Image (spheres, helix red, strand yellow):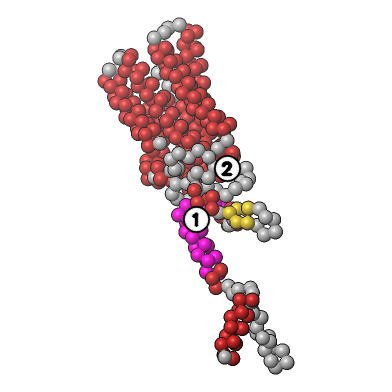
Amino acid sequence: MSGMMFGFCMARTVAQIMRIVWAVHPTDIQVAIASQVFVAAGVVLLFVVNLIFAQRIVRSAHPHAGWHPIFHWLFIGLYVWIVMTLAMIITAVIQSFYTLNANTRRIDRAIQLYGQTAYTVVALLPILIVIGGLVIPRKTRLEKFGSGRWREKVSILILSSLLLCLGASFRAGVNFAGGTRTRDNSAGYQSKACFYIFNYVIEFIVIIAYVVVRVDKRFYVPNGSHGPGDYSKKGKNLKVETRGEGKLEQVISPEEEVFDDMATEEVAKQMSSREMKDEEKAMSSPDISTPASVIVTNGHAPEPTLSPPEKKMEGERGTVFNK
């Protein structure tokens, strides 16, 4: 995850460098192509990062469905589709600089419009996935992962996805509305201010927010996780036998089941405190076989009932005293 964010930052740095070089050499076609390619390719990494975060949230809320092979391969297919779309956009951008054929340029423009629309959908997908995971009722308790509250993880992902979706929607709308305008007849949404705000400023806000809230800790999952229960190993011990039914049931706090607003560390502390309280109750509770009080009948207390070993010891004591 950190490697992907580093790659995104490097891609954006190179894109800015190429735009500076393009401003110095405006007639250099190769520099112009490189600048356009890096502008289109950088944000894809943030889309993929948000999809990975959404997948982890779904696996936390619905472990069995989230770890199902179908769900896994759907995400693999989505990543392949994103890469193929990026390859199509890069090819269309390069080809549009080296051809004057009207039909070829029309096809290249159609491919670029398709790519911008597809990336708008990809930017929106994490929101839809997380909302779907929240709406569908859960059958098991949440598998806490990383640090911080689960509600904060959902809020961070939704807000960042909204910002990225805003930038992707603006780029798609500009290409649909003003793609055929000339430089002399450009619209206000084609200005440099809009270009930098809806591309670089939005992405800068998202990446700085990720650094401030420490998504590397909040969305951390154990290495080698490959099935339900791997995100929170302690969740496997939260089972108790139900009275009268002879089956195992998971102990779920009603408040936590409704709000799920507890950090992983708080859940562990609560579990340990509950275990200590249960042990104290077990030690302090009187034995059922031992009477708590002696009932007096006719002014005389009944003799205590002795177990067979106690009777044998009492008999031996009596024999010693008689001798």
**Residue 259 colored in magenta in the image:** yes
Q: Quadrant of the C terminus?
A: bottom right
Judging from the image, what secondary structure is the residue with disc 1 in? helix
Residue closer to the observer: 71 or 4? 71
**Dot 1 or dot 2, earlier in sequence:** 2
Q: Amino acid at mark 1?
A: Val
Q: Residue at x 54, y 53 (%)?
A: 237
Residue at far front of view: 323
Q: Residue furthest top?
A: 101
Q: What residue is pinned by disc 2?
A: 62
Q: How many tags in the picture? A: 2
Q: Which residues are magenta?
A: 258-281
Residue at the disc numbered 1? 267
Q: Is residue 250 above or below residue 200?
A: below
What crowding class fits label 1: few (fewer than 14 Cα within 10 Å), some (14-19), or many (20 or more)? some
Residue positioned 31% across, 23% down in the render: 18
